[in-house]
Image (cartoon, coloured by chain):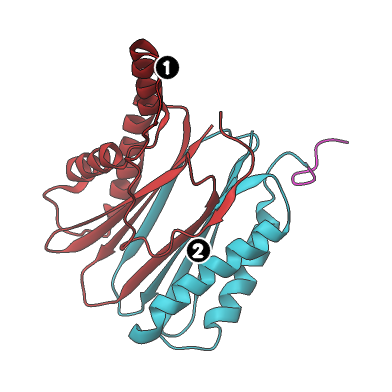
Amino acid sequence: MEEYPNGNEGSFNSEEADGVVKECIEAVVGGDDYSVNQVNKWTASIVERCLTQLVKQGKPYKYIVTCAVMQKTGAGLHTANSCYWDTAVDGSCTVRWENRTMYCVVSVFAVAIP
Amino acid sequence: RVSATTKNKRVGSLILKKNDRKSYSRVTFPSEAVAMDEYQTEEETAFVVEEVSKIIKESVEAAIGGNAYQHSRVNQWSTSVVEQCLSQLSKLGKPFKYIVTCIIMQKNGAGLQTASTCFWDNSSDGSCAVRWENKSMYCIVNVFGLAL
């Protein structure tokens, strides 16, 4: 009965976070093309929006949200992350989004408050 | 002891963030001996940006130092940068959980913008970002430290 993959109160629900992040990205850059003047504003909005939605869930976590927006010109981009934490209660979720002119990679890290 | 009340503080843009966490001074000291203990304890349990920055720079140099961007090797490089950083950080023995992220991008004129924001305890948690480059690629590493 206790073996459900994400029915556990104690661990981070990454599917839920995934959904929240996708909505935030769509809301901020949904129909736009890459623009040097706006990209600064976009990345700040995406992270703030994600953070606000996550905090609203009221769970006992500290959050770190990072976002990278890159123009599509054929360059290669590689991201990696590594975490030293309590794997039973902490978790992360990474969402990769793109449109015709840009890529957007958002990562959420949730660390339980002891 | 870290209290459970977290303050909502946005870190803002990674590249521009300046983190001055060196001020942990106390006004009154009951006695000389106790003062020394308190100072050392704070050193051992604070997130020291310079120290972390040094660790990151060394790890990046060691992993990709003299190399040119190569699609076939970049996976291995970013993994080794984060693993190297993390192992050096855990060797510091401080009571922190760490998150290390690394972005490697080929230089070909594309624009890249990154941002991060954190919901944590401002008095004990910290972050450090290092931007490194050579002729053919950029490497951006972030370390976030969350006090236990």
Residue B38 highlighted magenta (yes or no) = no
Element under label 1?
Answer: loop
What's the magenta region? A1-8
Query: Compared with residue B53, is residue A14 higher up or lower down, i.e. above or below?
Result: below
| Residue labelled with disc 2 | A106
Q: Which chain is red?
A: B
Q: Residues within 10 Å of mark 2 (few under 14, many from 20)?
A: many
Q: Which chain is cyan?
A: A
Instruction: Kindly identify the residue that appears in the image at 38 percent across and 25 percent down.
Output: B44
Query: Compared with residue B102, is residue B26 higher up or lower down, i.e. above or below?
Result: above
Q: In the image, residue B139 lies at what x, y percent?
A: 26, 57
For the residues labelled 2 and 1, say whether their Cβ atoms are less than 8 Å apart. no
Left or right, B42 with reference to A109: left
The disc labelled 2 sits on which kind of residue? Val
Q: In the image, residue B32 lies at what x, y percent?
A: 33, 13
- Residue B30, labelled with which disc? 1
Instruction: Kindly identify the residue that appears in the image at 46 percent across and 77 percent down.
Output: A42
Q: Residues within 10 Å of mark 1 (few under 14, many from 20)?
A: few
Q: Nearer the viewer, residue A21 or B32?
A: B32
Q: In the image, residue A72 lies at what x, y percent?
A: 35, 79
- Residue B18, labelled with which disc? none
Report in which chain the residue with disc 2 lies. Answer: A
